[in-house]
Amino acid sequence: MTLANLPAKRDMWWHRAGDWKISAPDDGKTNLEFSPCLQGVWVSHDEVGRSYHIGNDGQKAEAMAFQLPDRASAVAAERHIRTQIDRCALTAGDVGHRQRPTWHDVRTRVGHAGWTEIMRPVDGSHPGQDYGIFESYGVYRDGNRVGLVIMDVVGQDNNWDTEPGGPVGQLHPMIHNVKASVERLRA
């Protein structure tokens, strides 16, 4: 696995290509500590990571890709990551704050991809309010490789469609991000 297997700047969208900037150092390592949903889920594999930022207000994103011994192991790893995110959503944030994430499949030319979003309340907000930390998770697989993109945005003020042709008229950026990312797994 190399940096070529990760989304490039032009692959990462917010409103348009290149909104997310690659953070320095771009050394193939990533730190997923900001995501409470993915603590302790990794096992040692051939992996590479990259961090991104947007503006100066703490919005961040991470991408990881890793290679497993075979396709069956990759399928199991993808399932494990999704299950971990689902479990985390049930306990994210304050007491009484429960979510059941909806996974959205994304049509891709190669491999398999999907994404979901959960919201964690921030200090001063209450369960049910639409203010918090919005974590979008894109999980994708091709052959014996699995990838993950996480966007972590505070106080998201955008409405997105989860399917083409929706009423808002603008697709959630994770749809583009996972489409571009799964293609990079083959690089």
Image (spheres, grey):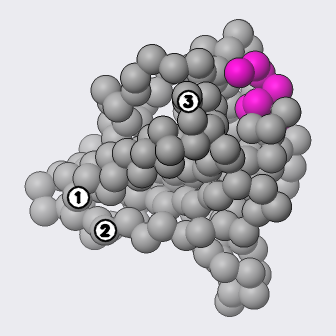
Q: Is residue 84 left or right of residue 1?
A: left
Between marks 1 and 3 in the image, the one whose residue lies nearer the viewer: 3
Q: Residue at x 66, y 67 (%)?
A: 106
**Whether residue 153 is situated above or below residue 33 in the rendered picture:** below
Residues marked 1 and 2 touching at CB (< 8 Å):
yes
Query: Mark 3 sits on what residue?
Result: 68
Examine the structure image and report whether residue 44 is included in the region drawn in magenta: no
Q: Residue at x 85, y 33 (%)?
A: 187
Residue 90 on image: x %, y %: 23, 58
Labels 1 and 2: the sequence-earlier one: 1
- Dividing the picture into quadrants, the one containing residue 70 is top right
Crowding at dot 3, Cα within 10 Å, few <14 / some 14-19 / many 20+, comes out as some
Query: Mark 1 sits on what residue?
Result: 90
Quarter the N terminus occupies: top right
Query: Mark 2 sits on what residue?
Result: 100
Q: Amino acid at mark 1?
A: Leu
Residue with the most extreme left position = 95
Residues marked 1 and 3 touching at CB (< 8 Å):
no
Labels 2 and 3: the sequence-earlier one: 3
- Closer-to-camera residue (21/7): 7
Residue 97 on image: x %, y %: 20, 61
Q: Secondary structure at mark 2?
A: loop
Q: How many discs mark residues in the rendered view? A: 3
Residue range of the region highlighted in magenta in the rendering: 1-9
Residue 20 on image: x %, y %: 75, 39
Q: Residue at x 75, y 87 (%)?
A: 165
How far apart marks 1 and 3 lie (CA) works out to 29 Å
Q: Amino acid at mark 2?
A: Arg
